[in-house]
Amino acid sequence: MMAHYLEMKKQYKDCILFYRIGDFYEMFFEDAKTASRELELTLTGKDCGLEERAPMCGVPFHAVDGYITRLVKKGYKAAIAEQVEDPKLAKGLVKREVIRVVTPGTLLGEGSLEETKNNYLMGIVCLDRTFGLAAVDVTTGDYLVTEVSSKRSLTDEINRFEPAEIVCNEPLMMSGLDMDDLKARLNIAVSVLEHRYFSDDVCRGLLEEHFHVGNLGGLGLSDYPVGTIAAGAVLSYLYETQKNHLDHLTHITPYTTGQYMMLDTSTRRNLELTETLREKQKRGTLLWVLDHTRTAMGARLLRSVVEQPLIDRERIVNRQNAVDEFNMNYISREEISEYLGPIYDLERLIGRISYKTANPRDLIALASSLEMLTPIKDQLKSFTSDLIRETEEEIDPLDDIRTLIRSAINDEPPVMLREGGIIREGYSKDADELRRAKTEGKNWLANLEASEREKTGIKNLKIKYNKVFGYYFEVTNSFKDLVPDYFIRKQTLVNAERYTTEELKNTEEKILGSEDRLYSLEYDLFVDVRDRIAEQVTRIQKTARAIAKTDVLVSFSVAATRYGYVKPSINEKGQIRIKNGRHPVVERMMKNDLFVANDTLLDNSRNRFAIITGPNMAGKSTYMRQTALITLMAQIGSFVPADEADIGIVDRIFTRVGASDDLASGQSTFMVEMTEVANILRNATRNSLVILDEIGRGTSTLDGMAIAWAVVEYVSSAKTLGAKTLFATHYHELTELEGALTGVTNYCIAVREQGDDIVFLRKIVKGGADRSYGIQVAKLAGVPGAVITRANEILEQLSDADIVDRAREIAGSSATTRKKIEKQDEVDRGQLSMSDTIRSDDIVREILELKVNQMSPLEALNELDRLQSKLKNRWNN
């Protein structure tokens, strides 16, 4: 056995091998040491022919799922070696095989996964400066494929999916992507697969074979050559680890990142879409506010919807109309919500059924869920909006599956498959007979005994049992003369004889072993039912998705009516107009209902750039975030917290909010800030919404103000960027840009002064603030009085009049400066020709005529200096 164990271990070197021995799974050698340490198991030893006993630990077979889950969540892989033949029938060593390898991305066990979140295994391929990406959730059958062209976009997708495990090719590890950061921050297990997994032909062939198509065009993968390799590599990895046909992976969904509003990692984090910045909790997020789903499938879909806002107006309006109709049919909506409540996780149930790991209670959960489908479908039939009608048509009542389960499986079956009590009476005649033999055997024997006593006249005739002879009739010698001919002698005793009959033999056969035969038959019948259900995986998955969509739309409707949200208009003119908008999360967290609503007006012309000034704690960040969240909510099809809203579709939302050192990677607050600003300036478009909070405060005052000023000029210009922008700052000098730059307007947070104290009114008003009220804020925060007094004294001695005057002077020249910025930006973006850039062919000619190979390094430097000076003179002129 130990020799077989070691041979099997060689094939699974990167796994902890769980080796089934009787009622336990045993681990040996280094695996035992690791498992005992990680799982807090007692480490023992076993004689195995070596000088020292082999380290050993084990877990009961019925509790193995919990132990494996704990190991896998710590980043380990577990190979399960099962006994694949009955030990009673085995000759010599019981045959064992690894039936499955469990990895972080392939966990299946009920209770081991968060039901409202997908558990993705992600494959990433780096090839020819393109990243192919495939994400699979084996518990639900979701299978998505895309391609991206930059490390930042790849990082954004990884952060969106938050996979439990990544498998990749070697070039990805050398691409410069910070895998160590991803492992640590997102707790992702990363494995580099061998080159054979990434063969183009093998990947294509595997996908075509699995999905039964003649070519990849039928899957929509023709435009995703690198994504196809990633998808094939993941599928190959799953085949090898799961040792399963994976029939529940019935469809693959290619997508482009351009189909949805782009949200980078920083924006997801700053807007707290699905988890809070500090506690990493759901409470306090947009998802928490909108989540009134009743099913696990709906909760997962809602998370996906929040993270993937739409940019297609028709799809947005379709969702809105569905939510609106649910709002207007409150009673029907509430009935549908009640029917949704009892529905179990259909996607993961059919996943376990397809995997052949589902137990009898899973089938009962499926049946009870299916009973809710017809009432939901009937309710939806009365609705008229396109999306609801489409969803209703996608719901299959699945009556045949429900009937099969109810006719075959007991209402309260055991969890274990080999304990009997699974199959309902009346489903199988053979099972019924064996069950009667098990439960009514004593009655049969008593009736037979009475019958034979009466027929023979032997008054003390008794049926007895022992392990050697089984059941027999015992007749004392005094009645031996009355024994009939059909009695067959089995044994002679001193005072009695023991006999059997054909009827007793038949009864004995029914009783003895009936329990084992019954349990075996019930198992076979259950497996047959499970397999018949697995054949209908496509129908069940389609219905599950329709139920999830219904659940999300109902959830949006509940949030809208409960919190007083309105249906926003959706325009493609680039205008964002919000009347009395509210922050969806902050207003829910406030207990006194005193949230102050504010208006917002942004467009692509005169109101594209708003500079917002005012003291800390006054509400600038809340206001800017609420604008971003309202825009996002509108584009996911939700109603929004406002009195009125007209939302222009934006292609991306960017946020630069707050300051945080990235000490782990050696980046300062200012470096992180500038990196995020650079990302925004390079990737935003005129159709983007940009939120900038306190740019430049991580460095000296003058440096910071200079950078902030330059950013305002660059972003506000329609030629360089022109994105709709909310820009909060403490550099009040920037308010001088209103009027000097087209599209720039000033706003501030209203403050009421009461002596030396201030009251934040939380209201956004036109105009710029002339001071930051920093000392008053410090006083509110509890800074000692002596410090406050001294700060006031110093403030009176300082004057920023010179800075303000200089700011006005610079603002006056901003129009000229902007032209230079626009020209330089065109150069940076490669939009000017060489002659436009240099404005002189003679310099180009000089460069072309240089004999570089004949020049010394010093001569080359001198020539470069001369040409540079010539260029500067011409540029300035």
Image: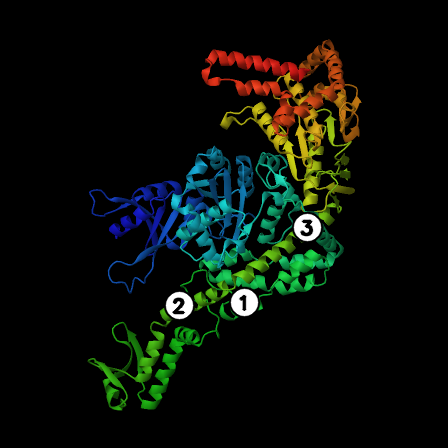
For marks 2 and 3, give the one nearer the viewer: 3
Question: Mark 2 highlights which residue?
Answer: 519
Please tell me which of labels 1 and 3 falls first in the chain: 3
> What is the CA distance from the residue labelled 2 to the residue labelled 3?
53 Å
Q: Which mark is residue 261?
A: none
Question: Mark 3 highlights which residue?
Answer: 315
Q: Amino acid at mark 2?
A: Tyr
Q: Residues within 10 Å of mark 1 (few under 14, many from 20)?
A: some
Figure check: 686 above or below 463: above
- Residue 752: percent from the left, percent from the top? 79, 25
> What is the CA distance from the residue labelled 1 to the residue labelled 3?
33 Å
Residue 365 can be seen in this image: no
- Residue 355: percent from the left, percent from the top? 45, 57
Q: Amino acid at mark 1?
A: Ile
Q: In the picture provided, is 91 more to the left or to the right than 664?
A: left
Q: Which mark is residue 401?
A: 1
- Residue 414: percent from the left, percent from the top? 46, 62
Q: Residues within 10 Å of mark 3 (few under 14, many from 20)?
A: some
Residue at the spot x=61%, y=18% of the render? 842
Residue at the spot x=33%, y=77% of the render? 508
Q: In the picture provided, is 822 more to the left or to the right than 426?
A: right
- Residue 762: percent from the left, percent from the top? 75, 31
Please tell me which of labels 2 and 3 falls first in the chain: 3
Q: In the picture provided, is 836 more to the left or to the right than 199?
A: right
> What is the CA distance from the residue labelled 2 to the residue labelled 1?
23 Å
Which quarter of the image is occupied by the C terminus?
A: top right
Q: In the picture provided, is 483 more to the left or to the right than 381?
A: left
Residue 22 can be seen in this image: yes
